[in-house]
């Protein structure tokens, strides 16, 4: 397998930079991103104090008038984005809160099924996707894992890095240390993610190396994949390293799983924007650079012990 992979990369694996174990203690409450309904949608929100927001004028007029950037996400992915107490919280919402202060508008998160998020943006349901989405060439060009055109491509404003993590049962009874240890076994993944492709690539490698068939079971959500591992039906759930670390710490009081990081396949996560919406893309890039500079970006990551995934500057379409 080659570089870069992440839950949020559908086709050529790019799901992200070594993040290290994330220790999130206690019940954390998001202090930004507006109030949100049980379905993950924010309550009606208007403009923030745009007169004092330095980058408000850089936004498209439509968003200035609405006072809102509609964000598509799959809020089942702790600690990156998940629902607790009827609110969407996590790393991505906290970064969005910092961006709000630069742009003068609210980020309104709405949760949906991961593999439909880009499509929902292109139909106008959301303005951007911010859901631990891996920046890959395939997504930039709207291609599937076989190089076939499946829809319009998107641009990415890259804001985080991560790598592959493997979630195994507590005690690691199968002795999994690397992806090669999965040969001859069954893995569970969330459908439509980078890690589904990582599993497919690894299955090909296992076959080529004569190490036994790697079977793949894909599920609509990652919690279903976790359940499969816990029940013994799969040896591992492939996911982002920070996510597997969080799950291992929290699930069953830390008694259900162990997390194994594979820091060699680093890649970026990006905020996805329609290619036609270059004004919004560029405003987001400038806002991200601003919060990196003023320290609010670092504070958002440190709240979740996710600082090892920090970027030092905003980039557009850096994923390979």
Image (tube, rainbow, N blue to C red):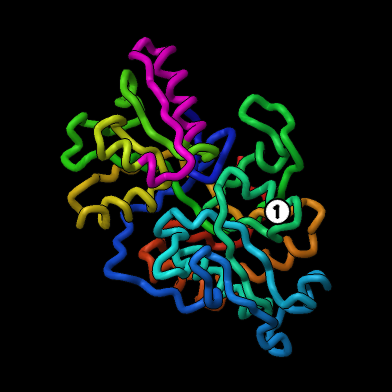
The residue closer to the viewer here, 116 or 23, is 116
Quadrant of image for the C terminus: top right
The residue closer to the viewer here, 98 or 20, is 98
Percent of width and height locating residue 1: 47, 27
Residue at image mark 1: 121
Is 300 situated above or below 320? below
Quarter holding residue 64: bottom right
The residue closer to the viewer here, 258 or 298, is 258
Q: Residue at x 66, y 53 (%)?
A: 272
Percent of width and height locating residue 165: 37, 42
Magenta span of residues? 196-225
- Name the dominant secondary structure of the magenta segment: helix
Magenta span includes 288: no
Q: Secondary structure at mark 1?
A: helix
Magenta span includes 209: yes
Percent of width and height locating residue 279: 79, 64
Q: Determine crowd level at label 1: few under 14, some 14-19, many 20+ residues with C-alpha closer than 10 A.
A: many
Q: Residue at x 61, y 80 (%)?
A: 101
């Amino acid at each position: 397998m080659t570089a870069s992979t992440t839950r949020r990369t559908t086709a050529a694996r790019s799901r992200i930079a070594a993040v290290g174990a994330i220790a999130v203690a206690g019940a954390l409450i998001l202090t930004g991103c507006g109030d949100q309904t049980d379905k993950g949608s924010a309550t009606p929100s208007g403009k923030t104090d745009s007169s004092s927001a330095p980058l408000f004028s850089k936004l498209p007029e439509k968003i200035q008038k609405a006072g809102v950037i509609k964000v598509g996400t799959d809020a089942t992915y702790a600690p990156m984005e998940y629902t607790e107490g009827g609110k969407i919280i996590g790393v991505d919402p906290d970064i969005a809160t910092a961006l709000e202060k630069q742009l003068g508008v609210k980020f309104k998160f709405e949760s949906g099924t991961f593999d439909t998020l880009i499509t929902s943006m292109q139909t106008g349901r959301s303005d951007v996707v911010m859901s631990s989405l891996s920046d890959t060439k395939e997504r930039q060009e709207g291609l599937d894992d076989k190089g076939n055109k499946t829809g319009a491509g998107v641009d990415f404003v890259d804001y985080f890095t991560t790598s592959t993590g493997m979630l195994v049962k507590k005690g690691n009874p199968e002795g999994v240390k690397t992806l090669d240890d999965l040969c001859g076994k069954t893995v569970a993944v969330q459908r439509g993610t980078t890690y589904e492709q990582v599993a497919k690539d690894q299955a090909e490698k296992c076959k080529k190396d004569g190490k036994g068939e790697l079977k793949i079971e894909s599920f609509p959500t990652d919690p279903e994949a976790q359940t499969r591992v816990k029940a013994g039906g799969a040896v591992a759930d492939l996911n982002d390293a920070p996510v597997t670390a969080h799950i291992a710490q929290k699930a069953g009081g830390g008694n259900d799983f162990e997390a194994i990081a594979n820091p060699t396949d680093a890649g970026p996560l990006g905020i996805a924007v329609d290619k036609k919406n270059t004004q919004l893309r560029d405003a987001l890039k400038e806002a991200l650079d601003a919060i990196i500079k003023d320290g609010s970006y670092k504070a958002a990551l440190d709240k979740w012990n996710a600082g090892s995934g920090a970027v030092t500057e905003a980039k557009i379409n850096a994923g390979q």
